[in-house]
Amino acid sequence: MAWRAVERRLRRAPSAHEELVPFLVALKVNRAINLGAYRLVCACGLRDLGFNVDDIAAELGVSARHARRLIGKDPGVAVAKAAHRWAPVEARRIVRALRAQLQVDGIRFHQWVMRGRRRVGPPTHPDRPRPAFKVKRLLHDEGTGLRRAGLSPEQIWAINIVGLGSDELNELLLRGSR
């Protein structure tokens, strides 16, 4: 109940559906993602339910002073910052796993050639294809095609956050149209 109260308040933020809502869902499943944000959300929710400082401190396993500081803090900005840091890292992990699955299926990810720390351009070997454009914002029809191809909502969310090569996206869309 406490969690839902704070979640409802935070969902009104403009970027809630892109970063904040997935972060809150993941935080509810695994609080180790960001223990500070988890404690802040729980403390504010418990305060809204009428718990006193000592009860909140005992529930969260922190001191009474820490519980008072958590209660006095607005969860909006702190949780939004934590979500903004978490979203690209999690999205890259999901897209990396999707790319690995595509490579197992025979679709290669086009990479740029690196010399030291700088990109020097497309691969120089003639047997390697040129790099594809990266698609970050999916259209509604593309999202529908990806769902038909068997991608989960988390994978589609990750593609919207960090992007996917256009050739890989087209391959997935072709699978969805079959």
Image (tube, rainbow, N blue to C red):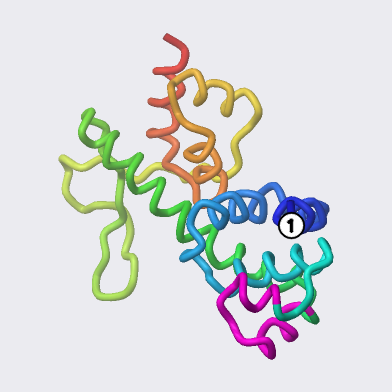
Q: Quadrant of residue 15?
A: bottom right
Apparent side of residue 4 relative to residue 35 in the rendered image (left or right) = right
The answer to whether 159 is drawn above or below residue 170 in the figure is below
Q: Quadrant of the C terminus?
A: top left
Residue position for label 1: 2
Query: Dot 1, how many residues are within 10 Å of its Cα: few (below 14), some (14-19), or many (20+)?
Result: some
Q: Quadrant of residue 24?
A: bottom right
Residue 17 counted in the magenta span? no
Q: Residue at x 32, y 41 (%)?
A: 99
One can see residue 47 in this view? yes
Q: Residue at x 65, y 78 (%)?
A: 57
Apparent side of residue 80 relative to residue 136 in the rendered image (left or right) = right
Q: Main secondary structure of the magenta part?
A: helix
The answer to whether 119 is drawn above or below residue 169 in the figure is below
The answer to whether 116 is drawn above or below residue 159 in the figure is below
- Tally the marks: 1
| Residue located farthest toward the top when viewing the structure as drawn | 178
Foreground pick, 103 / 81: 81
One can see residue 80 in this view? no
Assign a secondary structure to mark 1: helix
The answer to whether 158 is drawn above or below residue 149 in the figure is below
Q: Position of residue 88 (x, y in %)?
A: 51, 59
Apparent side of residue 81 relative to residue 10 in the rendered image (left or right) = left
Foreground pick, 12 / 94: 12
Q: Residue at x 51, y 51 (%)?
A: 29
Q: Position of residue 17 (x, y in %)?
A: 70, 47
Give the residue type at disc 1: Ala
The magenta span reads: 55-71
Foreground pick, 49 / 168: 49
Apparent side of residue 27 relative to residue 66 in the rendered image (left or right) = left
Residue 59 counted in the magenta span? yes
Foreground pick, 22 / 2: 2
